[in-house]
Image: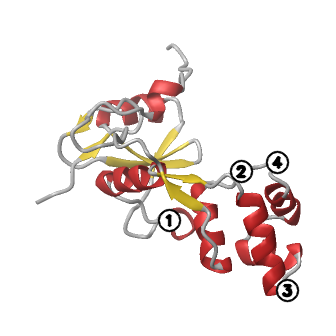
Amino acid sequence: MSAEYYCEICGKRIEGRPIYADVDGSHMYLCFECYEKLSRSGLAKPVRESGGGHRGFKAPTMKARRRRRASLELYDLVEDYAERIRAAREAKGWSTAVLAQKLRISESMLRKIESGKVKPSIELARRIESLLKVKLLEPVVDEESYYSDEDEDYLTFGDIVVVKRDED
């Protein structure tokens, strides 16, 4: 059974093999029509999947992307995330510089997170949880997921961005 793909520009279900392309620096799956339009203007170039793409990037299938989006949206940060992070860091005896290096973020960003001025992304919060052994994420109470398998109508890149095209 083959994976089901949807164009990340127009959202249309792709029949056959999708075109994996670099669209102005972002790797995405496209239908033939969107790829043709974008490649004519020089915005899209094909990317070889087998080589792992740009810097070892391996593109997930559309199903994997939906699962990841759904799993990321099912959690939210606890209200006292800043205090929990600071307390756990201090309990380990780490400076902000040490923790920032381990998380691969800047020290100023970590200071903003610890002061509560910036909320970490769900992915960063998971990395912090893993490193500091602290609970930062809690399940969202809303049972309905925007990206459920039954709901085929989900937001795509093309719904948000207007691509300027040179008229011939």
The earlier-in-sequence mark between 2 and 3 is 3
Tell me the kind of residue under disc 1.
Phe
| Residue 20 vertical placement versus 124 (above, below) | above
The earlier-in-sequence mark between 1 and 2 is 1
Where on the picture, by quarter, is residue 98?
A: bottom right
Tag count: 4
Label 1, label 3: how many angstroms apart (C-alpha)? 35 Å
The earlier-in-sequence mark between 1 and 3 is 1
| Circle 2: element type | loop
| Circle 1: element type | loop
Q: State the residue position of label 3.
A: 93
| Circle 3: element type | loop
Q: From the viewer's perspective, is the residue at label 1 or at label 2 nearer? A: 2
| Residue 80 vertical placement versus 31 (above, below) | below
Figure colour scheme: secondary structure
The numbered disc on residue 117 is 4
Label 4, label 1: how many angstroms apart (C-alpha)? 31 Å
Tell me the kind of residue under disc 2.
Lys
Q: Residues within 10 Å of mark 1 (few under 14, many from 20)?
A: few
Q: State the residue position of label 2.
A: 119
* 141 and 116: which is toward the camera: 141
Q: Residue at x 18, y 46 (%)?
A: 16
Indicate left or right for 118 with 31 as reference.
right
Q: From the viewer's perspective, is the residue at label 4 or at label 1 nearer? A: 4
The numbered disc on residue 75 is none
Label 2, label 3: how many angstroms apart (C-alpha)? 23 Å
The earlier-in-sequence mark between 4 and 1 is 1
Q: State the residue position of label 1.
A: 57
Label 2, label 4: how many angstroms apart (C-alpha)? 7 Å
Tell me the kind of residue under disc 4.
Lys
Do the residues under discs 1 and 2 have CB atoms within 8 angstroms? Answer: no
Tell me the kind of residue under disc 3.
Gly
